[in-house]
Image: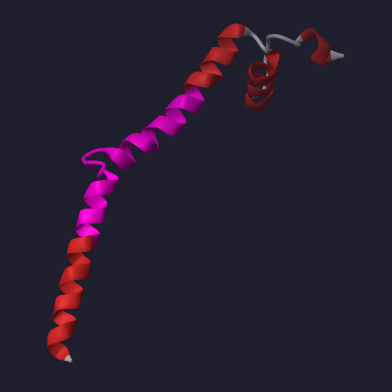
Amino acid sequence: MGGEANSHGGNRGFRSRMEYYIYSGDKKHVLAGIAIVSVAFAIPWYLMTRGTKQDSHQDYMARAEKARKARLSTGKSEI
């Protein structure tokens, strides 16, 4: 009976407040949730991709071909 009077305010616990925000469906709560999830995924993505240049497939194939030729040329002299 005491919990019914405090359904949207008063002295509630952290878990109760979080469940209210998560399941309320209020537009500002939904937008805040989307923002939190976006930040949670954006930070690791930024940290992983900073300072690295993405190579094209042609760059990768050129490096692989160069390494293959170097490996084959050293293999012939050993035989």
From what the image shows, is residue 52 above or below residue 9?
below
Q: Position of residue 17 (x, y in %)?
A: 65, 19
* Residue most extreme to the left: 77
Q: Main secondary structure of the magenta part?
A: helix
Q: Give the quadrant of the C terminus.
A: bottom left
Q: Position of residue 30 (x, y in %)?
A: 59, 14
Q: Position of residue 73 (x, y in %)?
A: 14, 77
Instruction: Please give the name of the residue rendered at 60% of the width and 7% of the height, measured from the top-left corner.
Output: 27
Residue in the foreground of this view, choosing between 36 and 52: 52
Apparent side of residue 56 relative to residue 44 in the rendered image (left or right): left
- How many marks on residues? 0
Please report the bounds of the magenta region as a residue range.
36-64
Residue in the foreground of this view, choosing between 28 and 52: 52
Instruction: Please give the name of the residue rendered at 66% of the width and 27% of the height, measured from the top-left corner.
Output: 15
Residue in the foreground of this view, choosing between 7 and 47: 47
Q: Give the quadrant of the N terminus.
A: top right
In magenta stretch: residue 56? yes
Q: Quadrant of residue 26?
A: top right
* Residue most extreme to the right: 1
Instruction: Please give the name of the residue rendered at 20% of the width and 55% of the height, measured from the top-left corner.
Output: 62
